[in-house]
Image (tube, rainbow, N blue to C red):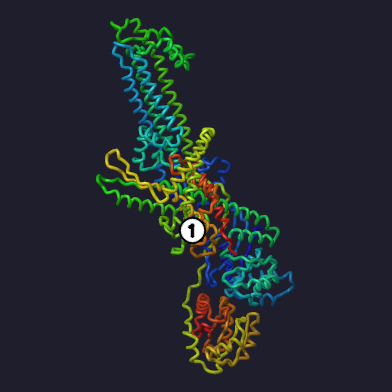
């Protein structure tokens, strides 16, 4: 699962460049097939469906598989190292020269006592988060071989996964439990090595075990300890439960002269089932249990690493939330090709220079302004006196408009057309311009005066709209003028 | 039948803006040039691919007089009028003169309701009646929307005219409308036809849920950014006898750049959630969002004041210390809470000017490594959060018809973090404190996201609704 989790995370990171709507659509479609499953199952199910459709995940994929593979190899190497360590340490602890028995206190202290101490330290500092004990915890973790392996893996795989004790949420949890798993493999290897060597020594060499102390310790007290220690297996492995006689016989003093009688030496060898059982029960078994627990927590941490990733939570949202789609086809058709705007009259004053009395027809379109105002403006600003003024609008039908135009002299040389500048020129306005051309001919100058709401010069935007629209007519005698007051 | 609404009207009166707003689609072309919309575009609102309603953006009327003349010339009884309009569309389907009219009338004769859009900021003109009459001939349910494009106010005149042709008349500023107004408009659509109510109600419900989800996702993105920025570090090997100061400055700059990029990344993600991928930010001196995160000005605007920091730090410390008191069953006589408050307050007060911790770390193979970060300044998470909340507020209310860059003016923020309720501020301070320790886990990030969602909701509630 680790490989999938890592791949999913890195793939989703890249997937951020996919348009949001596309992701939404893709994921919700898959999400509907995964209803009712747990969050992790949903994500993994989604991954199974997405994976075949995406060719570009190969590189991202490789990293997850590589990390998972590296973890497996590391665990195997640690198991082997632990095994060799166990063989070496137990070889030293079982060392028997035939002069004095192997001291049970030393032997069990090395093979069981010390490892138990490490185990307790592990449980205390790593499993139980002591607030404010970060320094001590880091120091202890620094001694952890699993952490060294983690650092090496980070460097070798160029990832940042095993840098534990960083405040980085779920990833730190994963690192912690993965490194604990590594440590357990090492410890299990150690105990297996110790047990295997111990058994081989027992099988192929003669060993004698005893206990010795300077303290005033009675054999009964030692027997009590032994009995308590052997309690877990006493019922089904009585041979691994020493009796009081054996305990009493096993005490030795180095000042004893002449060594031990052979009959006693053979009795002292009967400790071995107890020793191996003690190593197995108090050394190996707790580590196996701890490893099972660590694997269980690691699995949980990997799931958390998946579910706490912000891209994954976003993915779950997309998988589970009804897809509210609001979009449509936004592509517009080809816009009309922009044309050069109409050349504007430089200014009303210039226009006024060429004006002749009585040669202008003033037309007010759609009630943009009153006829009187338009006439007065033309006279005041342009110096042009109108021989005719008329109001026309789209409310009149074409025959009415033609009738009104008939009243105008067809030989007029210029037409001033006042219109609402805030309304865009519709095609029906263009039709009307055609009607004017039809009536007055193509030599007559036609000047459009789009007004603003103050009946003066039109807004630049509106003027641009008018100029652009009228430019499409390609009429050389058509102008747009600012109605400057 | 799926409720369908044809958005029709004069050219340049904001039809596309209304569609862009309701469809949350910033790709819709909106422009001052008549003819920006050349053909009808359907925008389907669906939930899990189940269409709930359809908006049809149409070109504007170009020759309503001619259309009405054609219809009136063939007028029979009132009951025949809709068929006559259909006949008009059929007969002029290939006539370029009536291309726009056919485009806008086609969805109506196919059963769409009518949303007639006018610009209430410009005066009413009797020429509009031609369009209204043509629409009346279709016999379809009609609603008029008075859009406000400019600053003028001719709403009353429009309303009087529109009331004669439309059963429902609403003012709707397409560019300024906030989410609640968009929902209100959708609800109003249901008034056109009772059969459409259930589909539109479910659409409103889905939109509301979607809105909530977006806010929560935004909060998660902001929390993610905060956690990332609060844990970022920069390291570099420091050679034997190498000068620490220049290296420290370089690493600090690199750290700041990474934080800036991470913040921008979070902003992009939030914008993407609200379908504002193309949203630009105004790069002007007056825009507070453009203020660099590492300037004193930015910290004063978005973070907490020193006094507020002191109070938040003390409260957060007191809560942590109170835990010890609880463990001791009160035997400590609240000494834990008192000491926690003192330590928290002092840390906030004296650490407020320091940006990031600088550490020199030993290496196994000799030499040393200089590490800058993570940023420990107590105000830093508040500044980041303040900026993120302000940005979210703008994005969440940014209308899809509005194409200007987003900009945050000074009056709009006024130190928002300082206005958070005490309880929320204390809880946030507590999480910020935990984030800077080794005990941070995914649970803290989730809790942070929940609190941020609360802050975002508060900020949204404070955003003044636009008319």
Q: Quick one: B179 or A196, which is closer to the camera?
A: B179
Q: Position of residue A253 (x, y in %)?
A: 32, 9
Q: Quick one: B458 or B316, which is closer to the camera?
A: B316
Q: Is any atom of residue B24 visible in this view?
A: yes
Point 32% across, 13% down: residue: A205
Looking at the image, residue B341 sits to the left or right of residue B121; the answer is left
Marker count (numbered): 1
Q: Position of residue B38 (x, y in %)?
A: 55, 69
Tell me the quarter of the picture where residue A218 sits.
top left
Above-or-below relation of B306 to A439: above
Above-or-below relation of B467 to A297: below
Q: Quick one: A371 or B94, which is closer to the camera?
A: A371
Residue furthest to the left: B241
Looking at the image, residue A91 sits to the left or right of residue B398; the answer is left
Looking at the image, residue B69 sits to the left or right of residue A344; the answer is right
Q: Position of residue B317 (x, y in %)?
A: 48, 42
Q: Chain of mark 1?
A: B
Q: Secondary structure at mark 1?
A: loop
Above-or-below relation of A93 to A258: below
């Amino acid at each position: 699962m680790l490989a999938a989790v890592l791949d999913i995370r890195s793939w989703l990171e890249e997937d951020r460049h996919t348009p949001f709507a596309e992701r939404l659509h893709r994921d919700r479609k898959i999400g509907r097939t995964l209803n009712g499953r747990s969050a992790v199952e949903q994500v993994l199910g989604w991954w199974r469906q997405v994976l075949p459709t995406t060719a570009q995940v190969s590189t991202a994929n490789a990293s997850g598989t590589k990390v998972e593979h590296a973890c497996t190899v590391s665990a195997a190497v640690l198991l082997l190292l632990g095994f060799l360590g166990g063989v070496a340490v137990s070889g030293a602890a079982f060392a028997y020269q035939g002069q004095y028995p192997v001291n049970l206190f030393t032997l069990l202290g090395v093979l069981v006592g010390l490892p138990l101490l490490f185990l307790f330290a592990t449980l205390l500092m790593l499993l139980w988060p002591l607030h404010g004990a970060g320094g001590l915890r880091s120091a202890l973790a620094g001694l952890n071989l699993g952490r060294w392996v983690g650092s090496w893996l980070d460097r070798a795989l160029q990832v940042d996964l095993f840098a534990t004790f960083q405040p980085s949420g779920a990833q730190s949890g994963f690192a912690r439990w993965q490194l604990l798993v590594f440590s357990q493999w090492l410890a299990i290897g150690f105990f297996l090595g110790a047990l295997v060597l111990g058994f081989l020594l027992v099988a192929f060499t003669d060993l004698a075990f005893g206990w010795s102390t300077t303290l005033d310790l009675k054999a009964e007290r030692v027997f009590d300890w032994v009995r308590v220690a052997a309690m877990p297996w006493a019922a089904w492995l009585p041979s691994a439960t020493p009796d009081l006689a054996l305990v009493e016989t096993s005490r030795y003093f180095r000042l004893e002269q002449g060594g031990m009688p052979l009959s006693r030496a053979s009795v002292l060898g009967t400790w071995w089932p107890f020793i191996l059982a003690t190593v197995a029960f108090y050394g190996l078994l707790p580590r196996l249990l701890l490893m099972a627990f660590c694997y269980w927590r690691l699995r949980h941490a990997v799931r958390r690493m998946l579910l706490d990733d912000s891209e994954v939570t976003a993915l779950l949202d997309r998988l589970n939330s009804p897809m509210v789609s609001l979009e449509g086809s936004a592509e517009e058709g080809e816009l009309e090709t922009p044309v050069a705007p109409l050349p504007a009259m430089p200014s009303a004053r210039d226009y006024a220079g060429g004006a002749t009395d009585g040669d202008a027809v003033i037309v007010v379109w759609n009630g943009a302004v009153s006829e009187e105002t338009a006439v007065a403006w033309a006279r005041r600003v342009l110096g042009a006196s109108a021989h005719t003024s008329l109001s026309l609008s789209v409310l009149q039908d074409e025959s009415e408009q033609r009738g009104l135009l008939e009243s105008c002299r067809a030989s007029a040389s210029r037409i001033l057309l006042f219109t609402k500048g805030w309304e865009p020129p519709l095609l029906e306005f263009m039709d009307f311009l055609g009607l004017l051309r039809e009536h007055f001919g193509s030599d007559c100058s036609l000047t459009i005066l789009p007004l603003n709401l103050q009946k003066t010069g039109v807004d630049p935007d509106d003027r641009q709209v008018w100029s652009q629209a009228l430019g499409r007519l390609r009429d050389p005698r058509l102008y747009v003028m600012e109605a400057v007051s | 039948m799926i409720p369908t609404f044809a958005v029709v009207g004069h050219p340049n009166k904001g039809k596309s803006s209304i569609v862009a707003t309701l469809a949350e689609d910033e790709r819709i072309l909106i422009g001052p040039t008549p003819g920006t919309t050349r053909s009808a575009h359907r925008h389907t609102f669906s939930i899990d691919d189940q269409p709930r309603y359809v908006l049809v953006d149409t070109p504007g009327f170009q020759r309503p007089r001619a259309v009405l003349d054609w219809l009136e010339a063939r007028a029979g009884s009132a009951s025949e009028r809709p068929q006559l309009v259909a006949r008009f569309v059929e007969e002029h389907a290939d006539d370029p003169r009536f291309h726009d009219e056919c485009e806008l009338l086609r969805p109506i004769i196919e059963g769409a309701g009518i949303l007639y859009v006018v610009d209430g900021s410009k005066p009413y003109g009797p020429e509009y009646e031609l369009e209204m009459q043509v629409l009346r001939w279709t016999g379809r349910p009609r609603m008029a929307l008075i859009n406000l494009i400019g600053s003028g106010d001719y709403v009353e005149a429009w309303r009087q005219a529109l009331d004669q042709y439309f059963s429902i008349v609403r003012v709707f500023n397409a560019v300024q409308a906030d989410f609640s107004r968009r929902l209100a408009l959708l609800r109003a659509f249901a008034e056109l036809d009772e059969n459409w109510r259930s589909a539109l109600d479910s659409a409103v419900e889905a939109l509301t849920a979607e809105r909530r989800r977006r806010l929560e996702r935004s909060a998660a993105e902001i929390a993610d950014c905060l956690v990332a920025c609060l844990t970022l570090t920069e390291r570099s090997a420091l050679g034997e006898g190498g000068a620490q100061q220049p290296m420290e400055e370089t690493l600090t700059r690199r750290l700041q750049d990474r934080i800036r990029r991470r913040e921008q990344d979070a902003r992009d993600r939030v914008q993407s959630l609200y379908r504002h991928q193309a949203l630009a930010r105004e790069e002007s001196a007056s825009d507070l969002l453009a203020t660099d995160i590492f300037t004193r000005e930015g910290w004063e605007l978005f973070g907490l004041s020193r006094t507020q920091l002191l109070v938040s730090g003390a409260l957060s410390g007191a809560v942590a210390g109170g835990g010890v008191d609880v463990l001791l069953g009160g035997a400590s006589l609240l000494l834990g809470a008192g000491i926690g408050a003192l330590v928290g307050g002092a840390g906030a007060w004296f650490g407020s000017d320091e940006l990031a911790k600088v550490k020199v770390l030993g290496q196994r193979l000799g030499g040393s490594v200089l590490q800058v970060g993570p940023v420990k300044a107590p105000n830093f998470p508040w500044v980041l959060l303040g900026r993120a909340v302000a940005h979210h507020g703008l994005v969440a209310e940014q209308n899809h018809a509005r194409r200007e860059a987003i900009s945050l003016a000074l009056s709009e923020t006024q130190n928002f973090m300082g206005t958070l309720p005490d309880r929320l501020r204390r809880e946030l301070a507590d999480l910020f404190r935990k984030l800077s320790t080794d005990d941070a886990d995914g649970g803290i990030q989730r809790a942070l996201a929940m609190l941020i969602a609360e802050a975002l909701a508060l900020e949204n509630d404070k955003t003044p609704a636009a008319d």
